[in-house]
Amino acid sequence: MNGPSIERTLYDLFAGRATPLQKKAVEDWLRTDGNMEVYYQLLARFEADHGQYEPDTQTATAQYEQFMQGQPYPRHRPAPVFTVSENSVWRQPRWLLSIAASLLLVLGLGYLTRGRWAYDRYETPYGQTKTLQLADGSDVTLNAHSVLRVPRFGFGNGDREVWLDGEGYFSVRHTTSDHKFTVHTIDLDVRVLGTKFNVSARSRRTEVVLSEGSVQLVRPRQPANPLLMKPGEQATLAEGDTAIRRKVVTVPEAAGAYRQSRLVFADTPLSQVAERIQDFYGVRVIVPNRELARRELTGTLPNNDLNVVLRTLSLSYNLAVERQPGRVILKPQ
Amino acid sequence: MPQPLPDRLPVGALAPDAPPPIMLDDEVLARQLFQTDPSAGCAWLFRRYYRLLCNHALRFVYSREVAEDIVGEVFCALWTDKGYEKITTSYRAYLFMAVRNRSYNYLRWELSRKNDSDEALPDSVTPVFSSETQTPADMVQFDELYQKINETIADLPPQCRRTFLMSRFEQKPYRDIAAEMGISVKAVEANISRALNTLRHMLRSEFVMALIVGQFIVFSLESSVGFAS
């Protein structure tokens, strides 16, 4: 790396265009004395060239000059509260401190990595589903592109908790001692005793469809008023929604149809059909025509192969399918 | 006193035999000012770097007000604690490092709050970076961090992103955002907490953990060295 090249590499790094190799090269380069100064020199120049807004330097400088003469420097917001640990800790004898620090290190590492060792992690790639049995005898079918985390120790003794990102069909075993089973998603907890239901926690919305029994929906931010669902109901919490919406679904099996490698739609708008295909195969599906996006589809498709799904859609609903790398566009014929 | 720096800083000091390009630097000017009148030196640095530092802090905290407060804090500390007497790097490097450290601490503090509603009192957290020094790995990780933040915000669903930026970047009250976007204030709150949650998830990812673990190791090594001596 010579002069102009390091300059370009650093600019790429600041702009987020650097490759991992370049980052490593910069890290090595920074170890040489004096290069840190060059780094900050270029960072300052980068900010001068790529500023995002123009603060009022004039007024702020005047305020700072008054501050140096004893006036308070005005803030926009109250200062964050930080706990200060330096004073008390550093008076302790050194050996005590090093033992404490080592202990803290071990505990800290264990605590920080608990996501790795304390949970079993089940993951499905795009285009595949997986069925598993949990230690308490409950069955779960994971839809494509989903992750389920289950505590590795003590699962099944007492209340059961799992964490879902994606979609899963749960058939929960009722325990003799009435222990609860909770599925946590990013914005909704589903609490049950023993029952069958589907949970879909995708980026745009979280959706629960109950096949049998009853479940309680709890929003972690409002734990006081849980919602009780009845069989055949669907509850939806879409992004931006403040309340859970519920409705009775005509075809409750549609929600778990991926278990039989099928896609089942019942008066489903094409925009949601597109999302389901996107969630399953990981390919972007775009419906640019608004009227078409609202058109509702009813029917069952085999769901083993993206090409077959698209061809069936195109034939049954008279759509033109345009394939591009990484995405699919559905248009009116 | 700051250690003497070369009057001119080489830009490409990588290849030892290649003649390094020379860049004129105004650090010399700042040092002369500090020797005669520290308050003039501070004011000069403020006028010279305020805009650049605010823009840099903005990449981390995504709020003009917070960015300006952070830069203000750095300069206030520079004057009150006579930080300018202890600087061993260039003033520029010191200021950028201090702003990065404070932005990082702020971010950790903000995202460690249990509740996102504006009234909620924050839990206090221990700052991770308390001194103005950084390793090469830290420096590169800081670059990665603000880009990750940028990407995370760019990847938010459009309405969520718009709400977040209107609230944070343009400092509009929830009421105005709701009126402008034709949604309820509750929906604005939901959008913003969704955005913050996404950021929180992102920050929990590997490399921020690496930063924190790195601090643990440094802390424990420092203590062990103390024990040995």
Image (tube, coloured by chain):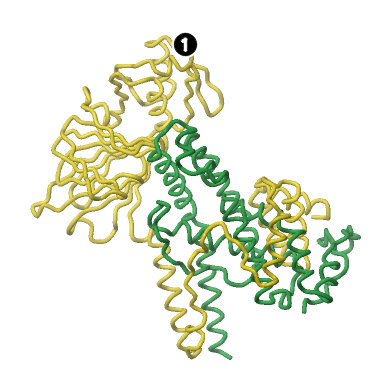
Chain colours: A yellow, B green
Q: What element carries label 1?
A: strand
For the residue pair B142 and B168, the one nearer the viewer reads as B168
For the residue pair B148 and A302, the one nearer the viewer reads as B148
Residue displayed at 46% across by 56% down: B111
* Image quarter in which the C terminus of chain B is found: bottom right
Residue B171 versus residue B78 in the image, above or below: above
Q: Which residue lies furthest to the left in this view?
A: A176
> Which percent across, then down, holds residue A195?
16, 40
Residue displayed at 30% across by 30% down: A258
Left or right of A222, for residue B209: right
> Which percent across, then down, holds residue A39?
74, 59
Residue A289 versus residue B138 in the image, above or below: above
> Which percent across, then down, holds residue A68?
70, 70
Res A144 visible = no
For the residue pair A190 and A136, the one nearer the viewer reads as A190
Q: Which chain does the residue under circle 1 lie in?
A: A
Left or right of A174, for residue B206: right
Q: How many labels does the image show?
A: 1
Res A160 visible = yes
Left or right of A193, for residue B174: right
For the residue pair B189 and B138, the one nearer the viewer reads as B189
Residue displayed at 51% across by 78% down: B220
Residue B174 versus residue A297 in the image, above or below: below
* Image quarter in which the N terminus of chain B is found: bottom right
Residue A251 versus residue A22 in the image, above or below: above
Q: Which residue lies furthest to the right in this view?
A: B19
The residue type indicated by label 1 comes to: Pro
Q: Is the residue marked by circle 1 packed among few (<14), some (14-19), or many (20+) residues within 10 Å?
A: some
Which residue is denoted by mark 1 in the rendering? A332
> Which percent across, then down, holds residue B185?
40, 39
Residue displayed at 47% across by 20% down: A287
Q: Quadrant of residue B5?
A: bottom right
